[in-house]
Each structure stands twice: as structure tokens, then as C-alpha cells.
Amino acid sequence: MVRASLAVTCAAALVAAAAPAAASAAAAADAVTHYSLDQAKSSLEFAFTQAGAVNKGRFGRFPVTVDFSAANLAASRLEVSVEVTSLDTGDKDRDDTLRGAELFAVAKFPQAHFSAARIVKIAAGFEAQGKLTIRGVTRDARVPFTFRTASEHGAAVAYMAGKLSIRRLDFGVGQGEWQATDQVGNEVTVSFALRLAAATH
Amino acid sequence: MAIQNTPHRWGSLSQLLHWTIVVLIIVQVTLASMADDLPNGMRKLTLLARHKSFGITILALAIVRLLWRRLNDTPALPDTLKPYERFLARFVHGALYVLLFAMPLSGWMMSSARGFPVSWFGFIQLPDLVPRSKPLYEAFLTTHEVLAWSLGAVVILHVAAALKHHFVLKDDTLRRMLPFTGKKERT
């Protein structure tokens, strides 16, 4: 109010000079931070039941674009693009089978995508609501996550983690004999823990 | 028939354990050789899952068997054996017991090392015994195979000896491990 009343009484030149500064200050408060993925310190894992036992795998490359501010969720964005062929379950034969035409069909569908249409606050943190595309099939998905910022050696970083459960057959991951779920379960738990570096301006 | 062993005859529990394990080993060899010839796929996965479940079953039965052996008389070897035959019989029986443990354990470790955890028929997931590692997997795979061939060799000796006792020496060494063949108990 003080600043506003001063502005009213000030010379036109002063008002003109002050207005952009005030506007950019307001924008900075609500600005989303652009983050880049620290791939080496991030993980994207999946767990599935095979022959009655929980088996695990991970993806090695999954470029992520995050623009985030807890104070401005409307302007926040989350895009994930998973290089499916980078999957690793610790066994080459199984990995090759997973990459094959009846499962992930990486030759035809090299990438899986998640794109958040909106990000909302939930009790346990945040939730990205959007579209998940795997093997060319797109479905609505909700990805709950936590987001924690930190300063490490003077650099602004953020840690983002979450877990969701999907059904592989919803996306056609499992054609032919792999449609059966008695040996390889339909439910797959996907979990991620990302280390993000804030872009420096 | 008595559940417990006597100095001259195997009791029904020992017989049940012996013959159940015989059947399971035949099932194991069958499953393993069927799976061996298959390309990777659901069928191979299913066969190997059963192979692992039966293997764990054998391991459990082997533990029961060893405990039961401690709680019981062990029927004596026939008096007619020469010292070297006595030694050979002990060696073969000892080797069979060792292999009943070593086969499933090496298979279990092989699965752990490969990152294919073992489940018992989907009811219980067993812990990994060793960390995931390709060299370890290959070492346990070789171990499992060598043990399997060793088991084959020891079983041949065991069966040959049993048949020799039955058909050549015509004593009751084989009969005392067979159900429904109990003569009057000698005490």
C-alpha cells in the first residue's frame, strides 16, 4: 500500500520505471524452477511377480523435464520419457525377452511417456495427473510423489520420489502366451527416486 | 508296519521319505531336461518355477529325513559285506545325503545369483542366498550340473547294489525298504 500510494504521487517517469520491477518481483515469487535430471543418481524401477516371486528391474535412461514450484502448481510441469530399451533386470535373456515383440516391442515402441496435465496437492505430497503411454497405448495415470528441495555445496537440488501401480495388460505388455498372468503377474509396481538439479539462470 | 525303524527294517516314515524323494528326483530330472530344450518363454518359465518348487520340497524332506535318521535306529548293513563293500556302502549313502542338500542349495543360489528369486509354488518367496552376479551364477550353474551328474553316478551305484543284494545275494536289503514286503519282524 505504501509503495502503491507513493507510486500514485510520483512522477510518471518514476511509475514507468517502477512498474516492471514490481511485476518481475511478483513473478519471481511464483516462478517455477526448471530442473534437470541427475541421471546417475536417479532411479526408475519396476517390480513384478514372476513364478510367485517378486522380481525387479530398472530403466537406465529416462529423460525428465520438471518445472516445479509448490507455490505455483498451475505452472508446474512434469514430462518423463523412458527409453524402454534401457531396461535391465540383471539377466540378459530376460531383458531380451522383455524387449521382444510380445512384451515391450521396443523396435516399434522405443519410448514410454508420461505427461502431466496438472499437478495437485495431496495429503502425502503431490500428484501428477496425466497420460501414460506404454507400447503405444495411452491411459490416464496418477503419479503421487514427494518433492523436497535442498542446497548441496551451494547448488539448489531437489529430490522427487514416488510409486504407482499399473497393470501391464492395460498397455498390451504381454501378447500371445504372455497374456497369462499365473506366472507373470499383471500388476507392476513402478517406483522412482530422482535427483534434480535446479537450472542456474 | 511300524512308523519307526527297527534294527532290521526301515519303518514306514523312512520308506515314505525315501520313495517320495525318489519320485521327486525323477520329476526334477524330467522338468530340467524339458526346460533345457526350450527357448526362453512362458513354458520354460513355468517348468523352471516347478523345478525350483520341487527342489525346495526335496530340501525340506532331506532335513526331515536326516532328523528322523538321528531319532531312529538305522538298520544294519548285511553281515556278509566285505570291508571295502562296507566302506563303499557308507560312502554312497553319505554322498546321497550330501547331494540331497547340495543339489537344491546350489540351484537356489544359482537362482539368487541370476536375479530370479525362488518361490515355493507361489506360496512363499524365499530369500536370496547370494547377491546378484553373473560370475557367481555361472559358477553355481556349473556346480548344479556337476552335482546332477554326480547324483546320477551315485544313484546308479546305489540301485546296482540294491539289485545285487536282491537278485544275486538274495538277502532282504532291498525288501526292507519296500512297503508290503514285511516278513515277520525278526527281533
Image (cartoon, coloured by chain):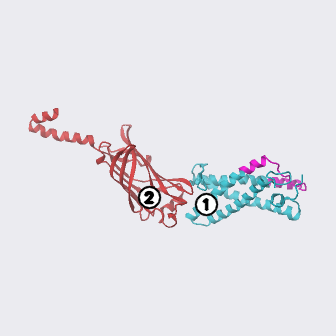
Chain colours: A red, B cyan
Q: Circle 1: is it few (<14), some (14-19), or many (20+) Cα within 10 Å? A: many
Cα–Cα span, label 1 and label 2: 27 Å
Residue denoted by label 2? A84
Q: Position of residue B179 (x, y in %)?
A: 80, 60
**Quadrant of the image for the N terminus of chain B?**
bottom right
SS at badge 1: helix
- Quarter-wise, where is residue A22 in the image? top left
Q: Which residue lies at the image location 84% right of the left edge and 54% below the top edge?
A: B9
B72 or B156, nearer to the observer: B72
- Position of A172 relative to A143 (above/below): below
Q: Secondary structure at mark 2?
A: helix
* Residue drawn at x 21%, y 41% as measured from the top left: A24
Between residue A124 and residue A153, name the one nearer to us.
A124
Amino acid carrying label 1: it is Leu
**Which span of residues is magenta-colored?**
B63-91
The percent position of residue A62, horizontal first and vertical second, equals: 41, 53
- Residue B75 in magenta stretch: yes
Q: Is residue A62 left or right of residue B140?
A: left
Q: Is residue A134 magenta?
A: no
Q: Position of residue A192 (x, y in %)?
A: 44, 49
Which chain is home to disc 2?
A
- Is residue B40 among what the camera can see? no
Q: Which residue is mark 1?
A: B48
